[in-house]
Amino acid sequence: MKLKKQNIKRILIFLLVIFIIVNIIAFAHAYKLTHFSTTQTAKTQSPDKLSLLEKVKTIFTGVNNPRPINTNVPTQLYETLYISGNKKLECWLIKNDTAKGTVIVFHGYGGHKSSMLDKADKFIQFGYSVLLVDFMGSGGSEGNQTTIGFKEAEQVNAVYQYLLAKGEKNIILFGTSMGAVAIMKATNDYNIKPQALILECPFGSMYATVSARFNNMNLPSFPMANLLVFWGGVQNGFWGFSHNPEAYATKITSPTLLLYGEKDKNVSRKEIDAIYKNINAFKKLIIYPTSGHENYLLKYAKEWTNDVGSFLLSAK
């Protein structure tokens, strides 16, 4: 009997040690996912490009996540603005002399405003002025933190309110991935009512997008995805499991264009369909059959241009 009790004790101690180690790894992973490094390290490649050894290393050490830096500037005349929300944000304003309104452009996770210049050029061709934004932690904006759309929603609202105060009445919000999620949360939290929304590949929930990282490496998401969402929220001051764009969609009242690539490994069609179903406004869903979680102009430049241009005409 005594030996049996000792064995049980050893098993419990072993399980406790494993639990602590797993949480330490999850804590470190969560920090790296939500805090950009200021050191000159190469960014970890997408899971499908990693070798088995690199995948194992990533599991234990986390991803290399260097701070995103703007790589070029607009070809048009532009003005650099600084707008304060929960962080000081650097923005580029490209004015169109005969503008129908202004499109505010928000980048995705690990992006920066210069990565959105090709989209900005399209909106200028459509007859709009464009305001490109660096979220906190990216480009010329303050900090090195990202909350994958949660606190970025306050920044969306700050930029939107800035334009309203300047007298702009026709404001369109465009965002890709995390940028789309931040827009959706801003409509939920601040009841903003832009002229229209254009949303590219938003994820359905924080848990879903973290789980996708493990699925892409052919690894089980439980329990690490749960722990990453938990610790990521704790580190950044929010409850990660409540970050749910599918629910935010119910508060959208502006005409909305939702764009998605059928080959997207980071966002499932199920998530997109749930978001689309929950939007309570004029809405349209466009699917690009061979695109993944990427810039749709790479494979569908003509189609994207026609789809977005037509939507802007119908959303007036």
Image (spheres, rainbow, N blue to C red):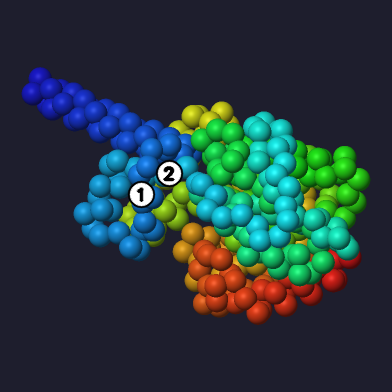
- Taking the spot 62% from the left edge, 45% from the top edge, the residue there is 134
Question: SS of the residue at dot 1?
Answer: loop
The reply to whether discs 2 and 1 touch (Cβ–Cβ < 8 Å) is: yes
Task: Identify whether 28 is placed above or below 45.
Answer: above
Task: Identify whether 302 is placed above or below 65.
Answer: below
- Mark closest to the chain's N terminus, 2 or 1: 1
Q: Residue 273 location, x and y as percent?
A: 64, 65
Residue type indicated by callout 2: Pro
- Left/right placement of residue 234 relative to residue 116 reads left
Query: Which mark, by number, is residue 42?
Result: 1
Q: Nearer the viewer, residue 289 or 114?
A: 114
Task: Identify whether 126 is placed above or below 166.
Answer: below
Which residue is situated farthest in the left direction here?
A: 3
Q: Residue 185 location, x and y as percent?
A: 69, 45
- Taking the spot 79% from the left edge, 69% from the top edge, the residue there is 126
Q: 10 Å neighbourhood of mark 1: few (<14), some, or many (≥20)?
A: few
Question: SS of the residue at dot 2?
Answer: loop
- Taking the spot 60% from the left edge, 61% from the top edge, the residue there is 201
Q: Which quarter of the rendering shows the C terminus?
A: bottom right
Q: 10 Å neighbourhood of mark 2: few (<14), some, or many (≥20)?
A: many
- Left/right placement of residue 169 relative to residue 104 reads right
- Taking the spot 33% from the left edge, 63% from the top edge, the residue there is 49
Q: Residue under circle 2?
A: 66
Residue type indicated by callout 1: Ala
